[in-house]
Image: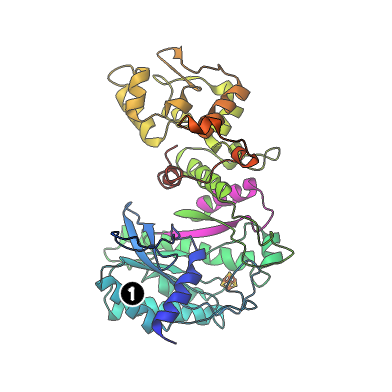
């Protein structure tokens, strides 16, 4: 098979894995324009120091001996199959790198013959790149559940980041949809990678030269909407993963139906993009805003509000804690105010050391006043038009999103679909990346 055909098949098969950040979009070049957008092949990721880097995103192979019902590569699915050799992966990466198309490689794989055999091939490819081609760019490698730890330990020396995908958020889901996988086979390699990172960090303090091991940490991916798992369970799982294994990121991937199966949502179900977006927002609240999963959701309310971001939703349900005076509230409380992000909270704390802040100055600092005004006072004055009324505040925050800017849209024919929230907009996606909301 020609290398170009393999690349087409194996870059397309890799697009369902979002554990390296973005998936692609498809766009044809127009007259006078420059460049095409392809669904798969090159994707963007964020390095540890915040740089956006482009990666060649491919599978080593999509031949799989497993039969996970939700996956396009399952053994019983009739799709074109291909497999790169480790040499081909190394050559492709170097050629793309030399042409300046990419800055790194994201290499994943289906389970080819056995977990050990697959991990051996992956290891061979990254070792070749580092040792023979002396490639110094970024490499994100998939850790294969069930593979021998010695292979994972060896591979970890050559790559920047590793991810072992959990995919399904509960054991019941695994049993039902991926019976060849078990919770242990996924959690054990994560635990092993974590313990190796800790060990190397410890050795670094004592010895001058210590070989690197996965310096950019590990990540994982959870599929949202393939199983009936509630947002509360998913968020608790993420919280646990961050705490137990110090994961760099948990990525959430809205389930894209690829099969008719009585245990899966129907093939016509739309991927739950808003739900995925809400989980990303909540994930930022866990990592940077001091929230816990149990504060954001509970057994009475196990799923996020599709119309409201999780922070506004939490604030409305805890109105007794508001309004807070921006000139006096501590940093932790400022972070809990809707419309105040990490950067604006830091700026508020710094600026008020020299002078009391006015309402107007909050806008310059970057506070989103249309949200924050319902939850703060500034120099003792409250600016929210509807008081501390939970239903009215909710209405204001939801309505603000649905307001249309021009006159014409005010006379738009009402349709049942206009009541549904929009798909995430570019600024929402940015908020998922920067966590400022
Ligand atoms: S093991 Fe991975 S590639 Fe194979 S069917 Fe399951 S999810 Fe798909």
Q: Quadrant of residue 41?
A: bottom left
Q: Where is residue 431? Give x, y as percent.
A: 43, 43
Location of the N terminus by quadrant is: bottom left
What segment carries the magenta color? Answer: 217-242
The residue at the far bottom in this view is: 1
Q: Where is residue 251? Give x, y as percent.
A: 50, 55
Q: Is residue 237 magenta?
A: yes
At x 62%, y 62%, the residue is: 257
Q: Is residue 382 above or below residue 419?
A: above
Q: Is residue 55 above or below residue 224?
A: below
At x 39%, y 80%, the residue is: 4
At x 47%, y 82%, the residue is: 83
Residue bearing mark 1:
93
From where the camera sits, is residue 389 visible? yes
Q: Quadrant of residue 341?
A: top left
Q: Is residue 297 left or right of residue 13?
A: right
From where the camera sits, is residue 246 visible? no
At x 56%, y 81%, the residue is: 114
């Amino acid at each position: 098979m020609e290398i170009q055909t393999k690349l087409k098949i194996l870059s397309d098969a890799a697009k369902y894995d979002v554990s390296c950040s973005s998936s692609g979009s498809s766009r044809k070049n127009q007259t006078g324009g420059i460049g095409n957008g392809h669904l798969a092949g090159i994707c963007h990721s964020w390095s540890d120091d915040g740089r956006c880097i482009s990666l060649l995103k491919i599978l080593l192979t999509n031949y799989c001996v497993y039969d996970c019902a939700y996956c396009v590569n399952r053994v019983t699915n009739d799709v074109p199959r291909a497999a790169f050799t480790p040499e081909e992966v190394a050559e492709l990466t170097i050629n793309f790198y030399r042409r300046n198309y990419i800055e790194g490689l994201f290499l994943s794989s289906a389970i080819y013959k056995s977990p050990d055999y697959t991990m051996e091939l992956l290891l061979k490819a990254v070792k070749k790149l580092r040792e023979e081609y002396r490639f110094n760019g970024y490499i994100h490698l998939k850790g294969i559940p069930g593979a021998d730890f010695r292979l994972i330990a060896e591979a970890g020396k050559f790559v920047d980041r590793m991810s072992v995908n959990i995919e399904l958020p509960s054991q019941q889901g695994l049993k039902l949809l991926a019976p060849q996988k078990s919770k242990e086979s996924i959690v054990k390699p994560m635990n092993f990678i974590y313990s190796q990172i800790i060990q190397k960090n410890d050795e670094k303090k004592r010895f001058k030269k210590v070989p690197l091991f996965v310096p950019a940490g590990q990540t994982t991916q959870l599929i949202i909407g393939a199983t009936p798992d509630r947002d509360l369970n998913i968020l608790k799982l993420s919280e646990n993963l961050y705490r137990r294994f110090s994961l760099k990121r948990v990525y959430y991937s809205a389930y894209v139906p690829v099969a008719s199966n009585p245990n899966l949502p129907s093939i016509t179900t739309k991927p739950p993009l808003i739900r995925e977006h809400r989980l990303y927002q909540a994930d930022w609240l866990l990592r940077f805003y001091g929230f816990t999963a149990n504060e954001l959701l509970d057994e009475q309310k196990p799923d996020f509000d599709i119309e409201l971001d999780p922070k506004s939703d939490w604030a409305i349900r805890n109105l007794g804690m508001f309004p807070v005076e921006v000139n006096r509230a501590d940093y932790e409380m400022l972070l809990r105010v809707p419309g105040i992000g990490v950067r604006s909270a830091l700026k508020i704390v710094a600026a008020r050391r020299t002078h009391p802040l006015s309402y107007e100055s909050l806008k310059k600092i970057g506070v989103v006043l249309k949200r924050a005004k319902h939850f703060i006072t500034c120099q003792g004055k409250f600016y929210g038009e509807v008081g501390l009324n939970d239903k009215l505040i909710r209405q204001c925050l939801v309505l603000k999103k649905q307001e249309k800017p021009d006159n014409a849209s005010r006379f738009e024919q009402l349709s049942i679909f206009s009541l549904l929230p929009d798909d995430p907009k570019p600024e929402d996606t940015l908020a998922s990346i920067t966590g400022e909301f």
